Image: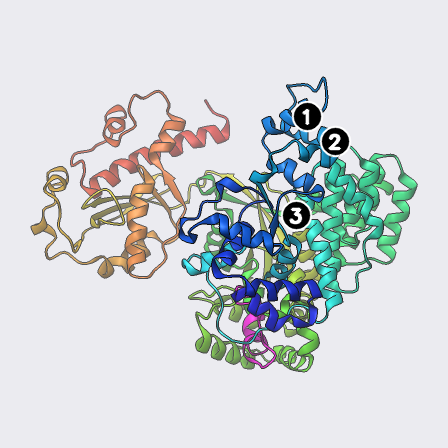
Amino acid sequence: MEMLDFVATHYAHVLLEEHVTFIEEFRQLEKHAQCLYVRLVNRKGRVFARNKLKYPELGEIEPLVETLRANGWVSSPRESHFQDVLGFLTRDEISAVLFSLFAGVSRSLKKPELISFAAEHCVPTDFLAQLNSDRILVQHRAVEVQYLLYLYFGRIQDGLSQFTMRDLGLVRTQNFRETYEPRFSDRTESLEHFYFARRLHAVRAASATELQEQRAETSQWPETNFSGSAAIRDKLAYQLGRRLEQTGDAESALDVLQTGESAQCSERAIRLMLSSDRRDEAEAFLERCLAAPRSDEEWLVAKDIYERKFRKKRTSALTDLLRESACIDIDESQIGAAENAAVEYYKAQGSEAWRTENSLWRTFFGLLFWDELFVAESAALHSPFEFLPATLADGSFYARNQQSIDDKLALLDSPRAIKQQLLQTSTRYYGTPNGVFRWRRNVLDALFALLNHAAGAPSRIMLRRFCEDYKNARYGYPDLMLIEAAGLRFIEIKAEGDQLRRNQLLRIEQLRQAGFHADVVRVRWVLDPSQTYVVVDVETTGGRGNNHRVTEIGAVKVRDGAVVARFQTLLNPQRSIPPGITRLTGISPEMVMDAPYFVDIVDDFEAFMQGAIFVAHNVEFDYGFIASEFARIGRPFRYPKLCTCASMRKLYPGHRSYSLAELCRAYDISLQQHHRALCDAEAAAGLLLLINEKRSRNLTGQP
């Protein structure tokens, strides 16, 4: 009822007569009949076994079914429901009907094959007549429900489970304003969007027969009069074309792809032309894309393919950019965290470095235009479930706020004024949920560095893209921002085996065209002798970080194959120490009674860890306890990890046990006070040296 009331209030101007009737007649149903219909809407499919509708909270189901049947909300299956019924029936049920209608039907056919046979050879009324149709119930008015849900959510939604998830506290809704704006201004716009959205939703799970039906319908697709519906049509053309291509129907796939106008559609169409030896057609298509591109991305795609296929260029622009890029050497123990490792690498070189990716530009955009997005009278959402402002969702942000946007963009030539405004906005609204960016403690650090080291014009160009086409401008930006002796630079980090995506190349080109220095940098994994490791061991009150606390931390810092520093402290765990733990570790309640709390030593420990790799024997245990202690005082703890147990298993196979004690015995490593933190950390450091020795030999090819 909440959904229907919302749609009736905000979308009366786009409802057809059948939708108005639906809402009115649904309101007239008794409540339990409404509840039963909603349960049908929330279930998968439109066909149900009547005897499996068991909802004790609704009382007797049969009278409710009859109420729905009498009012046209459900019925027994009819000819128009044939395909839905086939999908609902089991393989054996379909087989039984087919065996009664046709002689010689193979009993080994699988359900999809039986459905295809039935769809091709059966008269629907004859097939349905063989069923006990009284036990089958079909939900009516499914399209009307789908349209109403589409108006509310802006996407094809199967059911109302989002409301249930919200009421259970599992899904947040946005209530910073009570202002809601319909996503469609008139009926033509809403019906055009819905037309393409329904078909896009259906194509993903369509059968071969349904794909051909959709393909035949492409000639009847309506002209798109709105950018939103054109975008959905392009996605539909691409998805349908790819599905047809997968079935072997390349000719139909090519026809469908050419009805779309996206760079994705163009690229796939060109490749199909080339693979089917239609070079002249492909060349003409490429020349059209280059002469009159429909987007920057289409031009980039066309230029790349044209030069390789018709100008004998050997490699793609993506490959060229990767091959031409600089390379940095990072210790291979940081595999899996290439971007964070690169940040530390550049900081060690004396540069300032931030992990920025998409967050920098989205945060800059969101803070700079916070008033226009979230405060002004024109600021609104399309529904309580959405966080993205309506003007960004429908692409009208710049048109509606052109003067104030231009005024703020002009301020980019005055970094001091912009920084003051960003500081005021972030102070006033910090933590307010929004659909543009995520708040962080140091949200302004990278932004202020950008403003301090870049001219206003390049940023103005990039931010204007956000204002004019937010949905297509928000992703694909380089991983890092650096402040070096030569100035500000954006870099995309690529580790060995990584590929450069086309949207990343596009963003690099756009940044360069705007006036920024932007590059790709490759990471080469090596054994770096100057890499710092901190080998950690913790003693605790028990085995789980959620319920137990740390009683002792021991850590040794290793660099260039030697221990260079040590850290050790007992801690007051603020809870009891079980006698069994005392017997194991030797740490008694009396020993920690006057020991510091974790919060007292956290700064010293973090300084000891700075720039290092966190190493431990069974690293998840020690790392988990330390991270939990940091979380309790509201601080993050994120470091690359290396496990000496896992590494020894990999590099030194064949041991019956990989416990710390057994490995120390096998390799003659001192372990005099096992289960005391510093002693265990010293022993694990000895294993680390063995591990790095073996890694070094492996990397250099030595036996």
- Circle 1 residue: 98
370 part of magenta stretch? yes
**Label 1 – label 3 distance at C-alpha:** 50 Å
Residue 307 horizontal/vertical position (percent): 83, 45
Dot 1: what SS? helix
- List x then y, in percent, for residue 572: 16, 55
Q: Is residue 240 left or right of residue 325?
A: right
| Amino acid identity at mark 3 | Arg
Q: Is residue 317 left or right of residue 533?
A: right
Residue that label 3 marks? 501
| SS state under label 2 | loop
User: What label sits on residue 122 in the rendered view?
Assistant: 2
Instruction: Look at the image and tell me whether residue 351 can be seen.
Output: no
Q: Is residue 64 above or below residue 658?
A: below
- Placement of 631 over or under 308, stated as above or below: below
Element marked by disc 3:
loop
Q: Percent position (x, y) of residue 699?
A: 49, 31
Please give the name of the residue rendered at 24% of the width and 60% of the height, measured from the top-left corner: 599
